[in-house]
Structure formats: structure tokens, C-alpha cells
């Protein structure tokens, strides 16, 4: 990734790889391609992002996800959406069984299991 997206730091590159791998486990209409992942990395470099945050994911999800329904599913999966089971998100879509605890960093959310 760092060869194709110069300027992406090692920590951000690791977060991107782990995040995209996690996204690819979802049942999406179209999973993110390598090309889309590199586009996302380049977008984050332009934005001077040191790490993935909830706000950055919400603002840049279109770089890797092409369908609104997939985007909503991904945002919930990554904990970057306010949607909770049985509630509406900011885009007006309802969700079931995907509520996650929110962290500022997606990497933290992926590494720390949700406590109940």
C-alpha cells in the first residue's frame, strides 16, 4: 500500500488494511477493491490524517463503498454510525443486530471487544 499511496504512515496503513479486511467479511453488494482501498489511502493522505477516526470514515466512506446500503452497513459494522438495533441512522435507514460501542479510533474499536 505504501508504494501506491506515498505519504501514508505505517500506523494509518495498518489501520486501513485491517479495516478493509474487516469490511470484506460483510455481505455487501460490492466489496472494496484494491484500487478503491488505494484511493481511500490517498484521500486520507491529502486530508493529512494520522489515523482513522469516526469522522474521517463517515466523510470518506464513498472512496471504498459505492452503494448507500453497503455504506450504512459498513458504518454500523465499524462503529462509525449512531445507528443502534431497532433505531434509525442519520440517513434514515433502520438496522438490526449490528450496534457497536463507539470509539474515536476505528482501530481501537476493532482491537477491543465490546464489554457487556
Image: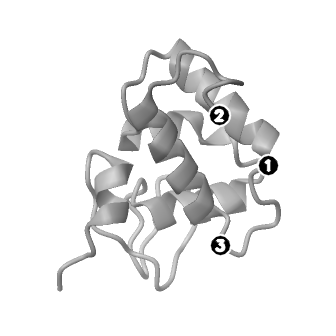
- The residue labelled by disc 2 is 1
Front: mark 3 or 1: 1
The alpha-carbon separation of the residues under discs 2 and 1 comes to 13 Å
Q: Earlier in the sequence, mark 3 or mark 2?
A: 2
Q: Quadrant of residue 2?
A: top right
- The residue labelled by disc 3 is 26
Quadrant of the image containing the C terminus? bottom left
Residue 86 x/y as whole percent: 43, 82
Residue 9 x/y as whole percent: 45, 25
Residue 81 x/y as whole percent: 42, 56
Residue 65 x/y as whole percent: 71, 49
Front: mark 3 or 2: 2
Nearer to me, 6 or 38: 6
**Disc on res. 33:** 1
Q: Is residue 52 above or below residue 77?
A: above
Which residue lies at the image location 31% right of the left edge and 63% below the top edge? 111
Determine crowd level at label 1: few under 14, some 14-19, many 20+ residues with C-alpha closer than 10 A. Answer: few
Q: Quadrant of residue 93?
A: bottom right
Q: Is residue 91 above or below residue 7?
A: below
Amino acid at each position: 500500500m505504501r508504494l501506491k499511496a506515498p505519504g501514508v504512515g505505517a500506523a494509518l496503513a495498518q489501520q486501513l488494511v485491517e479495516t478493509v479486511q474487516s469490511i470484506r467479511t460483510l455481505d455487501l453488494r460490492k466489496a472494496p477493491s484494491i484500487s478503491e482501498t488505494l484511493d481511500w489511502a490517498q484521500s486520507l493522505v491529502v486530508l493529512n490524517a494520522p489515523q482513522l477516526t469516526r469522522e474521517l470514515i463517515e466523510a470518506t466512506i464513498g472512496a471504498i463503498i459505492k452503494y448507500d446500503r453497503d455504506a450504512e452497513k459498513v458504518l454500523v459494522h465499524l462503529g462509525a454510525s449512531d445507528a443502534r438495533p431497532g433505531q434509525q441512522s442519520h440517513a434514515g435507514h433502520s438496522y438490526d443486530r449490528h450496534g457497536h460501542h463507539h470509539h474515536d479510533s476505528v482501530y481501537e474499536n476493532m482491537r477491543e471487544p465490546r464489554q457487556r
